[in-house]
């Protein structure tokens, strides 16, 4: 039942921030851990306690909040209702900032400096906040690959994907921050790999491959020497290339000796690596990556985490290039929550593969093409199939413009 009190807004518990005033918890058959109906959120522990007992709360949007500049006012919708364009810009700034932080940390270690755990924790926390605020925008940003910045960008993408999967698994805020930290640091050992091997534009030879396969051990050593680092991060850095069948490296241990975090990172690490352009190979399509993950269930990857990852990102995540039933080409711009098989598509090429007037096609509206045939997604493509630079679309602001919508 909607709340008719002026200025009272219903939001998801993952949108809660310190400083908000809660008016009521939407609890069915659970007892509230709080003594009063109205209270201010003062600590992260308050947020976690609320998340443990309900999914939605009602907050006082009129209350001015010194802690959160994004607090909704009477005439504004809550953060989750911000336009995709506005939220995407905020998410992009966080993505860029976190990427710069991880790149700086990696450069510091490569030059022999100490790991800054505080900096990495800050980057992980920023990613958690933005994933919870707008998972669609953050997922889209992971699809904008830049092969010349692979190592740092890969670590950031794995962080975001791990947080998304953690949310699907109903992790607490503390667990999400922890898995984000672990994912950011999973490849930290590569800072000890010679650049001529790391960036070699071709297949690694036997001795080169042996050196590359030492990066989990290097990562373990770097993290064990750091101050105030969680053991989970050490386990993930050391174990993300092991597998359930016991045929991974460097130890060849089976799933019984691997932490859940290591198994989670193994899945999302493989997905991002498969779909990324590298100096020696072009990335594969989203669906091809999912096919590889599914075929590797119970041998290469923990089956449960693969299934939950697919549930999490769907078959048509933002940023993927698709060909439609009439031959037009577009980019998945936004998910439709009511039907994830019918996203919103930014059309960019016509049926003859010529540049088209850019417009949004909402597949959930069951729209038809000029011949009266309902639009459907025919297949997912790789950007290099039609020499399309998704990064250019991003830098040109194509993902946040208000295009005419075909409905």
Image: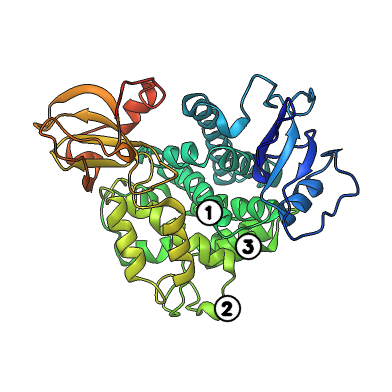
Label 2 belongs to which residue?
257
Residue at 43 percent across and 51 percent down: it is 313
Label 1 belongs to which residue?
162
- Which image quarter: residue 318? top left
Q: Nearer the viewer, residue 272 or 308?
A: 308
Which callout, 3 or 2, points at the residue further toward the start of the chain?
Answer: 3
Q: Mark 3 or mark 2: which is in front?
A: 2
Asked if residue 97 is positioned above or below residue 216 in the image, the reply reads above
Q: Mark 1 or mark 3: which is in front?
A: 1
User: Would you say the residues marked 1 and 2 are in contact, meaning their CB atoms lie under 8 Å apart?
Assistant: no
Q: Secondary structure at mark 2?
A: helix
Residue at 80 percent across and 49 percent down: it is 45
Q: Position of residue 23 (x, y in %)?
A: 80, 37
Label 3 belongs to which residue?
234
Query: For the N terminus, which image quadrant?
Result: top right
Asked if residue 276 is positioned above or below residue 23 in the image, the reply reads below
Residue at 57 percent across and 60 percent down: it is 169
Q: Position of residue 386 (x, y in %)?
A: 17, 36
Residue at 44 percent across and 71 percent down: it is 303
Find the distance from the CA under tag 1 to the CA under tag 2. Answer: 20 Å
Which callout, 1 or 2, points at the residue further toward the start of the chain?
Answer: 1
Q: Secondary structure at mark 1?
A: helix
């Amino acid at each position: 039942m909607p709340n008719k009190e002026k200025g009272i807004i219903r939001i998801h518990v993952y949108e809660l921030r310190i400083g908000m005033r809660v008016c009521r918890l939407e609890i069915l058959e659970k007892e509230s851990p709080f003594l009063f109906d109205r209270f201010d959120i003062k600590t992260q522990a308050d947020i976690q306690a609320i998340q443990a007992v309900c999914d939605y709360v009602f907050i006082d949007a009129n209350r001015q909040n010194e802690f959160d500049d994004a607090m909704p006012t009477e005439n504004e919708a809550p953060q989750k209702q911000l336009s995709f364009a506005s939220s995407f810009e905020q998410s992009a700034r966080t993505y860029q900032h976190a990427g710069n932080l991880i790149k700086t940390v990696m450069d510091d270690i490569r030059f022999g400096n100490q790991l800054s755990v505080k900096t990495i924790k800050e980057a992980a926390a920023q990613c958690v906040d933005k994933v919870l605020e707008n998972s669609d925008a953050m997922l889209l940003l992971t699809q904008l690959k830049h092969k010349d910045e692979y190592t740092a960008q890969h670590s950031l993408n794995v962080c975001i994907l791990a947080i998304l999967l953690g949310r699907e698994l109903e992790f607490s805020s503390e667990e999400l921050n922890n898995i984000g930290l672990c994912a950011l640091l999973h490849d930290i050992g590569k800072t000890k790999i010679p650049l001529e091997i790391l960036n070699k534009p071709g297949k690694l030879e036997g001795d080169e491959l042996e050196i590359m396969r030492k990066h989990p051990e290097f990562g373990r050593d770097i993290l064990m020497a750091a101050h105030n680092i969680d053991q989970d991060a050490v386990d993930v850095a050391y174990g993300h290339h092991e597998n359930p069948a016991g045929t991974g490296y460097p130890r060849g241990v089976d799933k019984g000796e691997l932490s859940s975090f290591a198994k989670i990172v193994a899945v999302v690490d493989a997905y991002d690596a498969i779909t990324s352009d590298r100096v020696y190979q072009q990335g594969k399509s989203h669906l091809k990556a999912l096919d590889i993950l599914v075929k590797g269930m119970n041998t290469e990857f923990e089956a449960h985490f693969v299934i939950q990852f697919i549930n999490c990102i769907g078959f048509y995540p933002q940023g993927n290039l698709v060909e439609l039933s009439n031959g037009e080409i577009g980019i998945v711009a936004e998910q439709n929550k009511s039907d994830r098989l019918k996203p919103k598509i930014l059309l960019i090429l016509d049926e003859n593969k010529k540049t088209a007037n850019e417009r949004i096609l909402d597949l959930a509206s069951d729209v038809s093409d000029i011949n009266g045939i309902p639009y459907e997604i025919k297949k997912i493509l790789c950007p290099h199939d039609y020499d399309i630079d998704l990064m250019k679309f991003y830098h040109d602001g194509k993902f946040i413009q208000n295009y005419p919508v075909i409905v």
